[in-house]
Amino acid sequence: MTADAEGGDAEAQFNLGIAYVNGAMGAPDFEKAVHWIRQSANQGLSSAQFALGAHYHRGEGVAQDYMLAVEWYRKAAVQGNAEAQFNLGYCYEIGEGVARNLEESVAWYRRAAEQGDHEASAALEELLEEMGSAAPPAAEPEPAPEPAAAVEPEPEPVAMAPEPAPAPEPEPEPVAEVAPAPAPVSAPVSAPEEPIVVTAPPAPEESEPEPEPVQQAAPAEPELPLEDTTPSPPAAPTIESRPEEAAPIPPLPLSATDVAPFEESETLEHVTEDASPEALFELGKKHLAGNEVEQDLITGGMLVQQSAEAGFSDAQYHLAELCHKGEGVPQNFAESVVWYHKAADQDHNLAQHTLATKYEYGEGVPQDYASAARWYQRAADKGNAASQYSLGTLYAKGQGVVQDHGIASNWFAQSAAQGNVSAQYRLGLCYQEGNGLDQDYAKAANNFRSAADEGHLESKYLLGKLYLDGSGVTQDYGQAVELFRAVADNGHPKAQFMVGWCSEQGKGVEQDFQQATGWYRQAADQNEQNGQFRLGFCTELGRGIMQSHPVAAGWYRKAADQGHAEAQARLGHCLDLGNGVTQDQAEAAKYFRLSGEQGIAEAQARLAQYFDQGLGVAQDQTEAVKWYHRAAEQGTVGSQARLGQFYEAGEVVPQDYAEAVKWYQSASDEADLDSQYRLGNCYELGRGAAQDYVAAYKWYNLAAALGHKRAQEARDKVASQMNPWQITEGQKGASEAYAGMRAKLVANRDTTQRLKRALGKLGE
């Protein structure tokens, strides 16, 4: 299937996309799904077009965009896809992604219902009741009177036909033979040749032009054919029978002669000359939609086009839509742009907006962001909320205009004020991030809330995070969980992760590790990297799920390969120790570097040790010092201690006792015993700090008390050079320092393990 999809097979591309949605290719991956579904949709597969519209509608694998959803639903609906017709009807009913239009909604619901869609039937019935019509009106073939009127005058020439005495053949049968020449016959014989004429019987001089219809007949012997053709074939239809046959919409003509009178005297312009462009447009729409009349795409298309050609901008816009869909007129994207232009030039607001979208996405015209911005601007200036939002997006991205987040946020604000949900969401982001506006979490929350009230999932999720952090709103874990849960139930992977995290931490809900891992699993199955990482972590520890190092390493790898920094560090740790995977320090070094470059101190410290000792990489102490520095600046005690040693010894870096003392001090404050001993030595010898036996005794005493043997010897040695008062001060300083370190010692993992071992609780 993958090979066929890569080869351009539209069905295979669609099926591959669905496979990524359903997780048949591993964990569900909406972005890859959209990639393949879009390729299929661009080839015209209606099921793919509908699916792509649904992804835009729900914001799965793409940024949520109701207008693009409507666009793809329309493409599929025009091809007869019932699901797309129903969704398009729904969008028109509530005005989502398109201007609210109940008439259009009814039309699309009806099409879906005619294909057996029960949901569409129910929606149609309900909508018609709301509109004041309990059932769809019966289709009345109103176009029929027009063709009938065209043959109404025919009885008059029929009455005239028997008057000429010399001719026994009153009806020369135009289809039978064209050879006879009427030269020997008196003028009245010509009357049947023009059945549409309603004037008085032709004067004798009018017989002169009569031979014109039969000029192609070559024989120049008029009298012989006259004798041969005198009896007319009895089976030929009489003129009197035509009106009854033509009452419905006329069938295709029997021959060129049948339509010649109409083509000559009743052109479309002649038939419609008494109707205004507005009336033609309204009648055309009814025939296209089958509203109050029987659906007739040909008649509808012709009437709309006639109105458009007369300069009526609404008809020009509608004709552009028909050209785009291929309904009533052949599908022609370039032609649709021509009509959008004509309507837009007359300040038709919807046409200006739609034309802008064509330029933005390169549909029917070469992609041109500058032209898109220009047309969005014209529509936005007249208050079109969708154009205001789209213009803001172009300014935010710097597409077709100079990037300006201030102008972008201004357009978002104007659109949001009109209730545009997407604009409310984007304006909330501007306030949250301080993008184009002063950062204001309270205003961000207000805009997210407005969009959330309209069902915008991403806004609900972000509002939940504000409640979780207490940013712009009063911190409320319960409210946060409620919002996360509402979004998570709709399949939002980030919200699923947050519900899991709150359950694990006991924030807003009772702590429940099983609930947490359940939500993490749902998020992880949708390829959400945070969910994958936390699920791996819980699996490694056996928290709410059966402990398994191989399974944990598998989840770490999934998240790490998506760039999750903490997962990269944990996977490096597994590879470093061989936990759940084959030990591979070269592979571990790769993941430590990836994680370290993203700022994870644990990974930076271990990578420094790798370079320091030549583990999994070539030994390089210059590189080691670089990574020790990064980890030490983030407070990693071991890195601070080792960095102090480098500066004290003058290895790789210039010798600098003051720098050594700085790093020893930092590590000593975090209860690193060797650093305490070395710091005491620096004070005893006056290296990097003024010589101070009291300070030296203090640090020696601390390290000795916690088991550092060399510190015990150094403490006793320096005490021999101190008076009793100095020793008392040194002991006092050691006790004060220990009181501050005690909590840090308990927080230390190694210390905790020792305490648990002593208490017999190591397995907890």
Image (cartoon, rainbow, N blue to C red):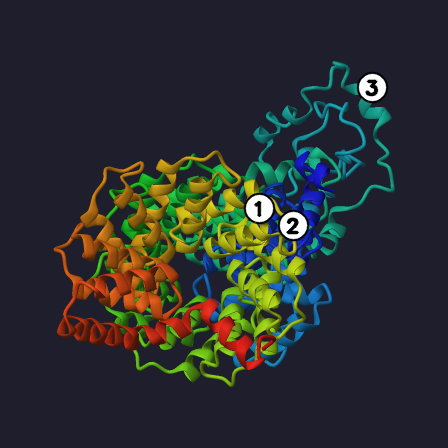
Q: Position of residue 481 (x, y in %)?
A: 46, 79
Q: Earlier in the sequence, mark 1 or mark 2?
A: 2
- Residues at marks 1 and 2, CA–CA distance in whole angstroms: 7 Å
Residues at discs 1 and 2 in contact (Cβ within 8 Å): yes
- Provide the residue designation for mark 1: 35
- Residues at marks 3 and 2, CA–CA distance in whole angstroms: 77 Å
Q: Amino acid at mark 2?
A: Gly
Toward the front, the furthest residue is 720
Q: Amino acid at mark 1?
A: His
- Residues at marks 3 and 1, CA–CA distance in whole angstroms: 78 Å
Q: Residue at x 24, y 42 (%)?
A: 402
Q: Earlier in the sequence, mark 3 or mark 2?
A: 2
Q: Position of residue 20 (x, y in %)?
A: 65, 52
What element does badge 2 sit on? helix
Q: Earlier in the sequence, mark 3 or mark 1?
A: 1
Q: Position of residue 629 (x, y in %)?
A: 31, 47
Q: Is residue 77 visible?
A: no
267 relative position to 344: left or right: right
Q: Residues within 10 Å of mark 3 (few under 14, many from 20)?
A: few
- Provide the residue designation for mark 3: 224
**Foreground disc of the pair 3, 1:** 1
158 relative position to 671: left or right: right
402 relative position to 540: left or right: left
374 or 139, nearer to the observer = 374
Residues at discs 3 and 1 in contact (Cβ within 8 Å): no
Residue 17 — which label? 2
